[in-house]
Image (spheres, rainbow, N blue to C red):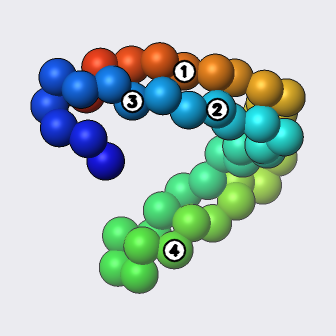
Amino acid sequence: MGTIGGPLLGEISDTLLMEVTIDPDTLVAIPVENGESWCINAHLFDLVIE
């Protein structure tokens, strides 16, 4: 990673995001039954690190 104020560039592609709950004791992600999901075909990002 860079420094604060520096650039953060990247791409997310062919990604499936799923709605989950996080077990507070084990930090394991558990998919939500009948939960939402999102497909990301491609997304470019160009941000400044804060």
Please indicate whether residue 14 sits to the left or right of residue 21 in the image: right
> Which residue position holds label 4?
28
Of mark 4 and mark 3, the one earlier in the sequence is 3
Between marks 1 and 4 in the image, the one whose residue lies nearer the viewer: 1
Query: Which residue is rendered at x = 70% and y = 59% of the image?
Result: 31
Do callouts 1 and 2 mark residues in contact (Cβ within 8 Å)? yes
Q: Position of residue 49 (x, y in %)?
A: 25, 27
Q: Position of residue 6 (x, y in %)?
A: 24, 26
How far separated are the C-alphas under marks 4 and 2? 26 Å
Of mark 1 and mark 4, the one earlier in the sequence is 4
How far separated are the C-alphas under marks 1 and 2? 6 Å
> Which residue position holds label 1?
45
Query: Which residue is rendered at x = 78% and y = 26% of the image?
Result: 42
Please state which of residues 20 and 10 is positioned toward the viewer in this rendering.
10
Of mark 1 and mark 2, the one earlier in the sequence is 2
SS class of the residue under badge 1? Answer: strand
Badge count = 4
> Which residue position holds label 3?
8
**Three-letter amino acid code at the position of disc 1:** Phe
Q: Quadrant of residue 12?
A: top right
Do callouts 2 and 3 mark residues in contact (Cβ within 8 Å)? no
SS class of the residue under badge 2? Answer: strand
Do callouts 4 and 2 mark residues in contact (Cβ within 8 Å)? no
Do callouts 1 and 4 mark residues in contact (Cβ within 8 Å)? no
How far separated are the C-alphas under marks 1 and 4? 28 Å
Q: Quadrant of residue 27?
A: bottom left
Query: Which residue is rendered at x = 31% and y = 47% of the image?
Result: 1
How far separated are the C-alphas under marks 4 and 3? 28 Å
How far separated are the C-alphas under marks 3 and 1? 8 Å
Label 2 crowd (10 A; few <14 / some 14-19 / many >=20): few
